Image (cartoon, helix red, strand yellow):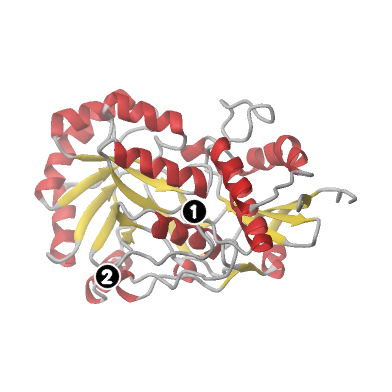
Amino acid sequence: MPRVAAYELHAVELPFRGKFEHAAHARETSSSLFLELTLDDGTRGWGEALPRPYVTGETRDGASTLLHESILPRLLGQNFASFEEVIDFLSHCDGLAPAEWVPSATPQSAAWCAVDLALLDAFGRHFGRAPFGPSAPALPAGFRYSGVLTSSRTWKQTAQLLAYRLLGYRALKLKVDEQSDPAEIARIARKAGKRIELRADVNMGWNVSQALAKMPAFAREGVTSFEQPLAADDFEGAARLVSETGLDVMADESLNTRGSLERLITMQACTAINARISKCGGLIATLARCREALAAGLWIQIGCQVGESSLLSAAHLHLCAAFRGMRHAEGCFGRLLLAEDPASPLLQMKLGGLPPRLPATPGIGVDINPGIIARYRLGHWQSVTQSK
């Protein structure tokens, strides 16, 4: 029966090709965690996470400490007789470490994502299985990714916008902030053209008064939904926006656990969710959140975090293939954003938002280049390998 025999945890700064800006943060590197698990037969699997204080309440240093001190030592020696047992374990965990390992109130969704993916990858390779079946299912017919327009107000934004139009993108997310006004949205809408659907992502940049004023005005210029307009913990304010504007309000930073989704649904504080694997505790838990949200009458956007490598992009593709109820998808930016991607094959969207091919190999479906990880590594934690 295969068991976890060793781990290595890497804190990594993958550089971007340029600065990425939105209302909550501006960054030029990924601030990633990569987890390598080794089974007792030598099989290796990798996980990835991007802890963000404003998303899950985790810093990278804090997530690293939690993993190294409380989670990974208990993972050593864990064995599974079949891949179904791995899925059952992760389904029971539901995006959080077992309560006897870490108190459930402790912020840990990003940290557990790295564990979730590494287990699926290592044991998937051992048992010859993809995450959701003997082989990966196909992506939905007509599947396209949205483009993303940052909040930078320079000639580069205009060039990026025109490129999206010329390349045939069907949907575009606009990063907006306090300075964004209807005139700016109108200019963007004219340049985008009528064939591109526009959505606004506020990244918690407004208060209730600003949102009540800006949302209807932006909607008149063609914006169809508003992602996380208020602070993540302002559920009551979000419920007001849903009720008083009648517009689509998408929860992003407000959602990372089953409990937060249940609260959003109970308070009617959103009409849609942005499900992202790294903030929702991994692939298995994120699929559960998508299904629960859809059952509650919400519509789904399957998103990504800025700086994901092709490892998380592969997990994202598996999720999009398994859950076909999403309205929009964002991901697979690859080297459009990263200066160097440690995972291969490179999973990067094609012109017009067309997706790359979903990997057909067992596990998550990509290999990690240890040399690239080492080149950009800031910290490293290694277990003592257990004897057989």
Q: Position of residue 124 (x, y in %)?
A: 62, 59
Q: Residue furthest right?
A: 387
In the depicted structure, whether residue 344 falls above or below residue 322: below
Q: In this orientation, which residue lies closer to the viewer: 231 or 248?
A: 248
Q: Position of residue 112 (x, y in %)?
A: 60, 42
Q: Position of residue 338 (x, y in %)?
A: 51, 66
Answer few, some or many: residues within 10 Å of disc 1's Cα (few below 14, many 20 plus, some between 14 and 19).
Answer: some
**Residue 215 visible in the snapshot:** yes
Q: Quadrant of residue 321?
A: bottom left
Q: Position of residue 133 (x, y in %)?
A: 51, 59
Tell me the residue at 54%/56% (across/down).
Answer: 131
**Element assignment for label 1:** strand
In the depicted structure, whether residue 162 falls above or below residue 270: below
Q: In this orientation, which residue lies closer to the viewer: 62 or 114?
A: 114
Tell me the residue at 59%/52% (across/down).
Answer: 117
**Element assignment for label 2:** helix
What amino acid is labelled 2 in the image?
Answer: Tyr
Tell me the residue at 81%/56% (across/down).
Answer: 40
Q: Tell whether 247 sits left or right of 81.
A: left
In the depicted structure, whether residue 110 falls above or below residue 162: above
Tell me the residue at 56%/44% (across/down).
Answer: 51
**The label number, if any, that marks residue 69 in the structure image:** none
Q: Identify the residue under disc 2.
A: 164
In the depicted structure, whether residue 61 falls above or below residue 237: below
**Residue 228 visible in the snapshot:** no
Q: Quadrant of residue 291?
A: top left
Q: Identify the residue under disc 1.
A: 27
Q: Quadrant of residue 42?
A: bottom right
What amino acid is labelled 1 in the image?
Answer: Arg
Which marked residue is nearer to the observer: mark 1 or mark 2? 2
